[in-house]
Amino acid sequence: MELCNHLLAIHVVLFLFLFPHVATKELTTSKTDLSALLLFKSQISSDPFGVLSSWNESLHYCQWQGVLCGRRHPDRVTALVLESKQLAGSISPSIANLTFLQKVSLSDNHFHGNIPIEIGYLSRLRTLNLSINFLEGTIPSTLGNSSRLQIIQLSSNNLRGTIPPNLVQCKRLQSHKNHTFHHRKP
Ligand SMILES: *[C@@H]1O[C@H](CO)[C@@H](O)[C@H](O)[C@H]1NC(C)=O
Ligand SMILES: *[C@@H]1O[C@H](CO)[C@@H](O)[C@H](O)[C@H]1NC(C)=O
Ligand SMILES: *[C@@H]1O[C@H](CO)[C@@H](O)[C@H](O)[C@H]1NC(C)=O
Ligand SMILES: *[C@@H]1O[C@H](CO)[C@@H](O)[C@H](O)[C@H]1NC(C)=O
Ligand SMILES: *[C@@H]1O[C@H](CO)[C@@H](O)[C@H](O)[C@H]1NC(C)=O
């Protein structure tokens, strides 16, 4: 009996030793990411499916619909994926404060206004899909500075102007280029 308890204790200790993240499961909060997400939400004027109703402070933001957080940095937002949700509004420049973002997909919604130039400051961004919206203005030249960008889809918007030269030179861009830029290729 006593031996059993002993063994159990050893097991628990071993378990905590092997899986320390289980023991400290409660998520820490990045104030920057939280306020950036709330600002993003504040610019959404229509959300007919109530997708963003889960975006409230009774849930940790890593559990909000469309928000993914990192494995190595569990409190930092790495992806924002809200596709085909009939969301209307503008894209808040505050998403540039989500500095761990690797993927932004807001495709097939009713976003209008400009693509915030601040998106180009996201140094970890790999995928940007803003296709099928009502975005206007030009493609921010800052996107050419996102050195990890691999996929960028902006088709089916009301964008004008040319593709920033530094973006065309982006070595890591894949063949999606084609589909992405076909509407106004100079
Ligand atoms: C917050 O989101 C959760 C999950 O969607 C929901 O059950 C809850 O009712 C929401 N709370 C408020 C105050 O809207
Ligand atoms: C980013 O966060 C800082 C500090 O909270 C804030 O002052 C700034 O306005 C934010 N930037 C954007 C574009 O929202
Ligand atoms: C971008 O979004 C469109 C529309 O939702 C989708 O068809 C396409 O597959 C997406 N592109 C990528 C690379 O995921
Ligand atoms: C790109 O980065 C370089 C070096 O950091 C900077 O000088 C330049 O102004 C940036 N360009 C844009 C369009 O942000
Ligand atoms: C590129 O464009 C050509 C002609 O418009 C089309 O046939 C081809 O399927 C496109 N490739 C991709 C990957 O979208």
Image (spheres, rainbow, N blue to C red):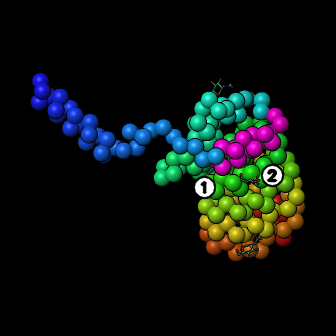
Q: Residue at x 31, y 41 (%)?
A: 16
> In the image shown, does 3 or 133 lie closer to the viewer?
3
**Residue 146 percent location from the top left of the image:** 67, 66
What SS does tag 2 mark?
Answer: loop
Amino acid under disc 2: Ser
Q: Give residue 156's mark.
A: 2
- The answer to whether residue 116 is seen in the rendering is yes
Q: Is residue 150 magenta?
A: no
- 146 vs 60, left or right, is right
Residue labelled with disc 1: 100
Q: Is residue 45 magenta?
A: yes
Crowding around mark 2 (Cα neighbors within 10 Å: few <14, some 14 to 19, many 20+) is some
State whether label 2 is within 8 Å of ligand 3. Answer: no
Q: Residue at x 16, y 34 (%)?
A: 7
Q: Give residue 171's mark.
A: none
**Inter-mark Cα distance, 2 to 1:** 27 Å
Residue 99 versus residue 60 in the image, above or below: below
Magenta stretch in the rendered image: 32-46
Q: Could you tell me what secondary structure mostly forms the magenta stretch?
A: helix
- 2 vs 110, left or right, is left
**Residue 137 percent location from the top left of the image:** 88, 58
- 47 vs 70, left or right, is right
Amino acid under disc 1: Phe
Residue 159 versus residue 41 in the image, above or below: below
What SS does tag 1 mark?
Answer: loop
State whether label 1 is within 8 Å of ligand 2. Answer: no
**Residue 166 percent location from the top left of the image:** 74, 74
- 59 vs 184, left or right, is left
